[in-house]
Image (tube, helix red, strand yellow):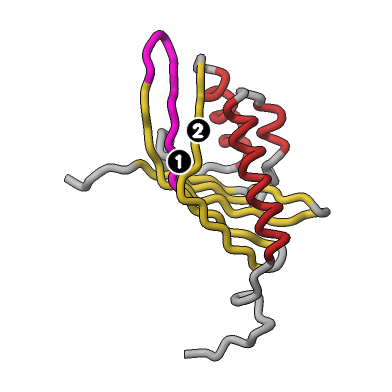
Amino acid sequence: MATVQQDSILVKPYAQEQLEVERRIEDIMSAARRRSVDELESYHAFGRKFTKFDDFEPLERQDADTTRRLEREAILGVEEFDPRVVDLKIDVFGPAAVTTFVMDYTVAAEGERHELRARATLVLVNEDAEWLIVHEHFSPFVANG
């Protein structure tokens, strides 16, 4: 087992950066809740290094263009989207951060209301003093059969 030095990015707390990332997660959820897709898109580092795995079709890895299109369709295609972050954990590694949480969310569409729950991971990178999403992964809470 390797020895980790006290000044290593693996052990430094990055307290200020953690607060910045937490605020960015709040901004992301607020934009999604208000269905402000342009604002939501601005929190992503869409480009060739962006990836996403979603808990809805298509289940394969999505690129930036696919994610942008599907998120826009999903958010604008419902009457209400109310995400709530539960048990947020933020680990900062210098200019990168890994966030994990449970996302409880309500979706209302076509007169029906659904309560859903997903496990979530967002990876963010600090680019020009702004935390941007470079990877998303959502998976539903379901038992294997």
Q: Is residue 42 above or below residue 12?
A: above
- Specify few, some or many for label 2: CA neighbours under 10 Å numbering under 14, 14-19, or 20 or more: many
Q: Residue at x 45, y 40 (%)?
A: 103
Seen in the image, is 52 located left or right of residue 133? left
Q: Residue at x 52, y 57 (%)?
A: 89
Main SS of the magenta part reads strand
Horizontal and vertical percent position of residue 73 = 55, 22
Q: Residue at x 36, y 41 (%)?
A: 140
Horizontal and vertical percent position of residue 18 = 66, 58
**Magenta stretch in the rendered image:** 102-113
Q: Nearer the viewer, residue 90 or 50?
A: 90
> Does residue 107 belong to the magenta stretch?
yes
Q: Is residue 46 above or below residue 96?
A: above
Q: Is residue 111 above or below residue 62?
A: above
Q: Place residue 55 in its image quadrant.
A: top left
Q: Which residue is mark 2?
A: 83
Check disc 2 and give the amino acid type: Pro
- Specify few, some or many for label 1: CA neighbours under 10 Å numbering under 14, 14-19, or 20 or more: many
Seen in the image, is 62 located left or right of residue 107? right
Horizontal and vertical percent position of residue 47 = 69, 46
**Labels 1 and 2: the sequence-earlier one:** 2
Seen in the image, is 15 located left or right of residue 122? right
The secondary element bearing badge 2 is classed as: strand
The CA distance from mark 1 to mark 2 is: 6 Å
Question: Can you tell which mark lies on residue 103?
Answer: 1
